[in-house]
Image: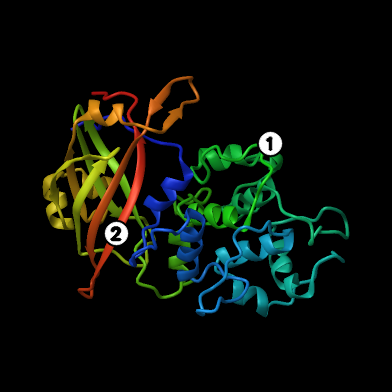
Amino acid sequence: MKRTRFAAAAAAVIMTFALFAPAVAADETTTPEAYAADVLYQLGLFQGVGTDENGQPNFDLNRTPTRQEAVTMLVRLLGKDAEAKAGSYKIPFTDVADWAKPYVGYAYANKLTLGTGATTFGGADTVTPAQYLTFVLRALGYSSQEDFEWNAAWELSDALEITYGEYTAETKSFTRGNVAMISASALGGTMKNTGLTLLTFLKDAGALKKTDLVLMNFEVVSAKTNELDIAFFPIPGSPNTYTVFQVNSATINGQTAKLDQATNTKAAYAKNKELESLYPGAFNYTVISYQEEAALGAATQFYDSPWGQKFPLLLVTFDCTATLPDGRTVPETFTEAIYLDNYGQ
């Protein structure tokens, strides 16, 4: 069976929701940035700046981080918080706050960051998208001397699908929320010359906090007129998986769709024999039947492709119920944006 060509929309916000679905219901008012920060927090890879009156972490997502804060967040993303604090790193920089020295020291020793001069780091300066993306790409093993230009780091991060074209030389605003989004997306990034995602590397290293979180992905395996065949599966390195995953309902641009699904791994593999090799551990395979013409006509968002075509986006909203290995059930509600450029053969 040949796979029909399908392209996912270049929409980082929606991609984040699909890629990182937690095993707890998200507040409907939660922003994508807060959602990403909470996922990282549950994994032990992100911290707030304190707690609110309810004891919940305050991520301070609307503020632009300094370079020393950004490096600290990077080191925590790599699961190296304790190692950095326990180390005795020497740095040549005179403008790094005492609390940040272990993190800047770790990053400097491991060639994740450089200074702005022989003795300056610019610790209190605000970080730019290019700088933080450079930090992340270096963490994945890529070199700003060989693999990318640091002042256009988004070109490689876009190619690796860590970012989706939202950062350019013209980007003016860059917040801790943006850092959370990039960091969460980077977990699915492939480390250079290894074939491993950052998340798998962290899991194998024992760097993830124990959690019920299920990190999952969604893929359109094939597309025909009025039909989308979809697989749901844990991304490599996910702390947990689902034993049962039931799609209760789905809408496409507000249009109700009909479902024919397999709701566990064994049944999904039986329904499509390619899944075991393509998407190991797939816990659901759903055939969605819908009125494509009506759904496209109801589109309110569009994707302008690099080759000059404009595609209406199909916003697919899923309402699901998932079962964890211990028998607990949790709701999963999320939206994914897709476009179809052709059906292929």
Q: Where on the picture, by quarter, is residue 213?
A: bottom left
Q: Earlier in the sequence, mark 1 or mark 2?
A: 1
Out of 267 and 190, give the one closest to the viewer.
267
Q: Residue at x 48, y 42 (%)?
A: 161
Q: Position of residue 20 (x, y in %)?
A: 40, 57
Determine the CA span between mark 1 and mark 2: 36 Å
Q: Position of residue 16 (x, y in %)?
A: 44, 51
Q: Is residue 210 left or right of residue 117?
A: left
What residue is at 25 percent from the left and 63 percent from the top?
242
In the rendered image, the quadrant that contains the N terminus is: top left
Amino acid type, callout 1: Glu
Numbered badge on residue 17: none
**Tag 2's secondary structure?**
strand
Looking at the picture, does residue 243 appear above or below residue 139? below
> Disc 1 designates what residue?
170
Above-or-below relation of 288 to 267: above
Horizontal side of 22 relative to 76 (left or right) equals left
Q: Nearer the viewer, residue 230 or 2?
A: 230
Amino acid type of the residue that numbered disc 2 sits on in the rendered structure: Glu
Q: Is residue 307 above or below residue 135?
A: above
Where does the image place residue 280, in percent across and percent down from the top left?
27, 53
Measuring from the top left, give residue 285's x and y in whole percent. Answer: 19, 48
Query: Residue 332 — which label?
Result: 2
Q: Nearer the viewer, residue 1 or 126?
A: 126
Which quarter of the picture shows residue 299? top left
Q: Is residue 269 shown left or right of residue 295?
A: left
Q: Residue at x 55, y 68 (%)?
A: 79
Mark 1, other Cα within 10 Å: few <14 / some 14–19 / many ≥20: few
